[in-house]
Image (cartoon, rainbow, N blue to C red):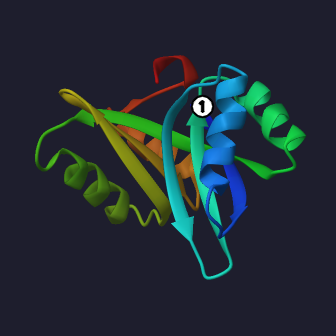
Amino acid sequence: MTIKQISVFLENKSGRINDVTKALAAEGINMHAFSMAETTDFGILRLIVSDVDKAVKALQKENFAVVLTDVLCISCPNVAGALSKILENLAKHGVFIEYMYAFAQGEVAKIVIRPSELESCQNILKDDDCNILCDDEL
């Protein structure tokens, strides 16, 4: 099961991240997780949201450049070594992870992964009994 991630390309100037959050808030869209990466000229805000289609429309209405990407989100115990075990197994199978980010909620950690080979990674995680989440489980 994959989930949709929204990537928003932002100019590196004060207030641009807030412009995104205001546009989403105005439409009642909740951000479940996000990650910000930057270069000299621009930033990429990656988001997992409560309503992808509505968020894309809201952001495009405000003239943001938006791209949708399929990613995996897994859940594991929020304890030392749990993620390491998962990543070790993926590395053993030659899975390259382009990027990832995580958030914890009490005793559970949720990790968003963008592997180079999505289907292969998903199969390896399933074989390893990893809990792969869908949109309504976030």
Q: Position of residue 77 (x, y in %)?
A: 20, 33
Q: Which residue is mark 1?
A: 49
Q: Residue at the location (58% across, 43% down)?
A: 47
User: Left or right: 56 with respect to 101?
Assistant: right
Q: Is residue 128 visible?
A: no
Secondary structure of the residue carrying tag 1 is strand
Furthest residue toward left: 80
Q: Position of residue 90 (x, y in %)?
A: 36, 57
Instruction: Using the image as rendered, state which of residue 109 and residue 91 is in the foreground.
Output: 109
Relative height, residue 38 to residue 78 (above, below): below
Which image quadrant is residue 95 in?
A: bottom left
Relative height, residue 29 to residue 120 (above, below): above
Q: Residue at the location (68% across, 46% down)?
A: 19
How many badges with numbers are in the image? Answer: 1
Instruction: Using the image as rendered, state which of residue 80 and residue 58 is in the foreground.
Output: 58
Q: Is residue 79 visible?
A: yes
Badge 1: how crowded within 10 Å, few (<14), some, or many (20+)? many
Q: Residue at the location (65% across, 70% down)?
A: 12
Which amino acid is tagged 1? Val
Q: Residue at the location (78% across, 50% down)?
A: 66
Q: Position of residue 38 (x, y in %)?
A: 56, 71
